[in-house]
Amino acid sequence: MELFNSKLDEARDKPIITCLEYIREYLTKRIVNVHKVLDKCKGSLSTTATTILENNKTEASKMRVLFNGADKYQVTGLWMEQYVVNLKERSCTCRKWDITGIPCQHAIAAMYDKMQNGSECGDPEAWVSKCYWLSTWNAMYQHTIDPINGRSMWPRSDCPTTLLPPKHHKQVGRPQKKRKRAVDEPTQSLLSVIRQVMGNGDVKEVTNFKPKKFTFSSVLIYDKLVNLLVLFVMVAMSSINHTLAKACSKGCY
Ligand SMILES: [Zn+2]
């Protein structure tokens, strides 16, 4: 069921007719794929169940079995691991048979012991859950879905009702105008700083930041101030030189 739900993700938000068409086409393809797999399978079980069962059969030959005279068997492995098998209830205390539906190595060892003692037991394949049988798969997927014509060939409905969209309901409160930013998206102020540092001229396109520009008058005032400063320094230097010259002429040095 969960697998089917995950396959419908693409069609879940589509209109009902589109969604139903998606499901129909998906099931058509799935049935064909299952038929292809069934054609490749050999034996009476699915490929997975056959592989697991063959491995368990190999391990079962190494087990030691003790029969209690009723339906239970005590099965001991090479590493002294020991479990109880109940063939009547189709269970083993290792829980593998109960969970998977495929007889574990202990259960198969008990079956072999039962056969050696002359009792009718049947092949281990017969003890596997029917959900692994190819006959069950064939029965489940025996039906096919017929293809259909396009919408232009569909018969028109006699239903007089016209489906109208639902009435628009205005939400309470002021509608939000600002775009929601992503979690890792930088804020507007940070973008302004980045643009200012980088010196990009496309500031207006990204943010509302406007870099300050020097006008003609401000540049003129700045030049005058620099000239005054240079003049002041030159006057100061000349007065110092004049003082030094006077001192030398008086013979101070
Ligand atoms: Zn077991």
Image (cartoon, helix red, strand yellow):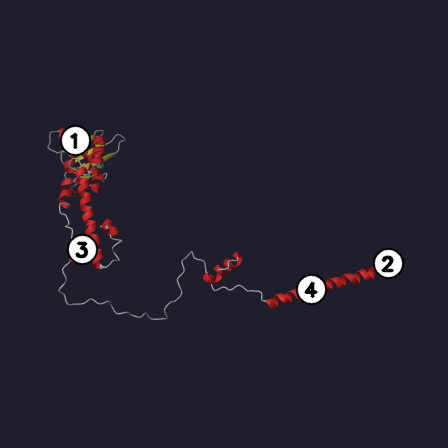
Residue where numbered disc 3 is placed: 150
Alpha-carbon span between mark 3 and mark 4: 88 Å
Is residue 25 in view?
yes
Tags 4 and 2 in contact by the CB under 8 Å rule? Answer: no
Q: Quadrant of residue 48?
A: top left
List the single residue furthest toward the right.
251
Mark 3 or mark 1: which comes first in sequence? 1
Alpha-carbon span between mark 1 and mark 4: 113 Å
Residue where numbered disc 4 is placed: 227
Residue where numbered disc 1 is placed: 112
Mark 1 or mark 2: which comes first in sequence? 1
Residue at 19% x, 43% y is: 34
Residue at 63% x, 66% y is: 220
92 above or below 221? above
Alpha-carbon span between mark 4 and mark 2: 32 Å
Mark 1 or mark 4: which comes first in sequence? 1
Residue where numbered disc 2 is placed: 248
Q: Quadrant of residue 109?
A: top left
Which amino acid type is shown beneath numbered disc 3?
Gly
Q: How many marks?
A: 4
Tags 3 and 1 in contact by the CB under 8 Å rule? Answer: no
Q: Position of residue 130 (x, y in %)?
A: 15, 41
Q: Helix, strand or loop at disc 4?
A: helix
Which amino acid type is shown beneath numbered disc 2?
Cys
Residue at 18% x, 48% y is: 28
Alpha-carbon span between mark 1 and mark 2: 131 Å
Q: Helix, strand or loop at disc 1?
A: helix
Mark 3 or mark 2: which comes first in sequence? 3
Foreground label between 3 and 1: 3
Which of the image's four quarters has the C terminus? bottom right
